[in-house]
Image (cartoon, helix red, strand yellow):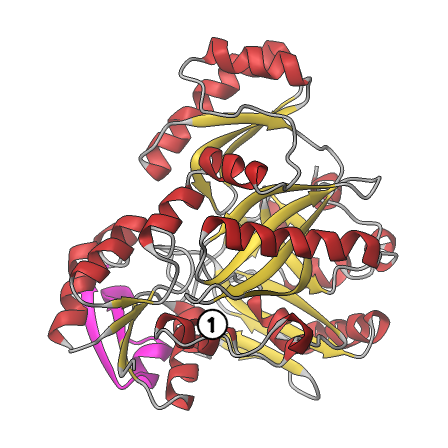
Amino acid sequence: MIKKVLIANRGEIALRVARTCRELGIATVAAHSSADRDSAVVSFADESVQIGPGPSRDSYLNIPAVVEAARIRGADAVHPGYGFLSENPDFAEICAAEGLTFIGPPAEVMARLGDKAVARRIMSEAGLPLLPGSRDTPDHPEQAAQVAAEIGYPVIIKAAAGGGGRGMSVVHDPDGFERAYRHTRSTAQAVFGDGRLYVERYLASARHVEVQVLADAHGAAVHLGARDCSLQRRHQKLVEETPAPALPAEIVEPLCAAAVRGTLASGYVGAGTFEFLVDGEGRFYFMEVNCRLQVEHPVTEMVTGLDLVAEQIRIAAGEPLGYGQDDVDPRGVSIECRINAEDPRRDFAPAPGSLTEFTVPAGPFVRVDTHAAPGYRIPAYYDSLVAKVVVWAPDRPRALARMRRALDELHADGPGVVTTTGFLRELLDHPRFVAAEHDTVLIESLTR
């Protein structure tokens, strides 16, 4: 039984985890930086402990400080949220060595799937379709260029240890390949501490569709349906919805079945997400596995009625799922919009500052996950996410109408503060999105 959880994260996800823990009767410890000492989760949690100064490398990414905070506060489990240490197998392994339950997949599974080249091999052996590409990580740009020539341009160069939309470059012709390769390798080394790369065919126009899975340590796994995450900029998602619109069952069902097959083949345990690209002919291709809770998990919760954080905790405590695929019954449509402190008119540059006004929408079937409030200062150290607005409705037209109304109600203002709210409101009216004919390059085409 898990009795006390240290939350090794910040912002809305830290508060969201703390709320589920309170409902389950589990005590919480908020680990925070000096910049977040007055944050919402610090006030909400049962205890708090400062783990370092503002910069994340000295606080939320400081493994010894996080583990020591759990030890001195008597926590018996750690929830990493998303980002920061959530997909760090070394952190998961250290937690286990210190007698802390890591609320996520086992370290060895995370290490295998976190290496994108290894994950491709595992999924290929499990029968999941892959885009043509390298089966390993070429050591030299000449070797990688040979792979690109064989599979045909355009190609995408990806960091083997990458994630979060970072460490990747699209190359359209051989002339730009070596420069892009060296730049991506340098970025991967700086961001992930691992410069290994792989190459695969790039689909210029595709849908980004992902499948939420849950798996216990007793060999059971289910999927919770497919989410569409195609509206993104620089590989960062802005709008997500479930079910994936305009995808027929003859595509979605085998795609979800493939995700479950990959879950079992990899020995995955916990909540995870399988990401796929779907081309214009309805063919789908495995991309990667996210070994953590996704930012967009609320849309799945809204249609299934499952609390994914509670499921994570139950699985980490060794409990069986207790239900099968036939027991999962998604209903209706849910859409999420990410409200970021960014200025769309300045190429989405960060726009932090102090919130003098912050009014969130309400009403039937509207959920807002946020840590912000009037007077809150948005720090410049971290991700620009301020809030997630999530709606549910029986069908997509009504869900879109509800989201439009919700965004009209949201007001976030203050010196220096600009958010993506207005841009998202316009995006919801774009004819291609309304008709569910959007793809991963729609936003880029609008902001060139």
Q: How crowded is mark 1: few (under 14 residues within 10 Å), some or many (20 or more)?
A: many
The residue lying at 67 percent from left, 55 percent from top is 257
**Which amino acid type is shown beneath numbered disc 1?**
Leu
Q: In this view, does 353 lie to the left or right of 439?
A: left
Residue 251, position as x, y percentages in the image? 79, 51
Instruction: Identify the magenta region.
Output: 30-53
Q: Quadrant of residue 393?
A: bottom right
The relative height of residue 440 versus residue 41 in the rendered view (above or below) is above
Residue 31, position as x, y percentages in the image? 25, 70
The relative height of residue 357 versus residue 25 in the rendered view (above or below) is above
The residue lying at 60 percent from left, 73 percent from top is 324
387 or 115: nearer the viewer: 115
The residue lying at 56 percent from left, 50 percent from top is 262
Q: Is residue 14 left or right of residue 435?
A: left
Residue 192, position as x, y percentages in the image? 35, 38
Q: Quadrant of residue 204?
A: top right
The relative height of residue 200 versus residue 115 in the rendered view (above or below) is above
Callout 1: SS: loop
Check residue 124 for magenta coloring.
no
Residue 96 in view here: yes
Q: Is residue 19 left or right of residue 438?
A: left
Q: Mark 1 points at which residue?
A: 355
The residue lying at 38 percent from left, 88 percent from top is 22
Residue 181, position as x, y percentages in the image? 49, 20
Q: In the rendered view of the protein, which quadrant contains the N terminus?
A: bottom left
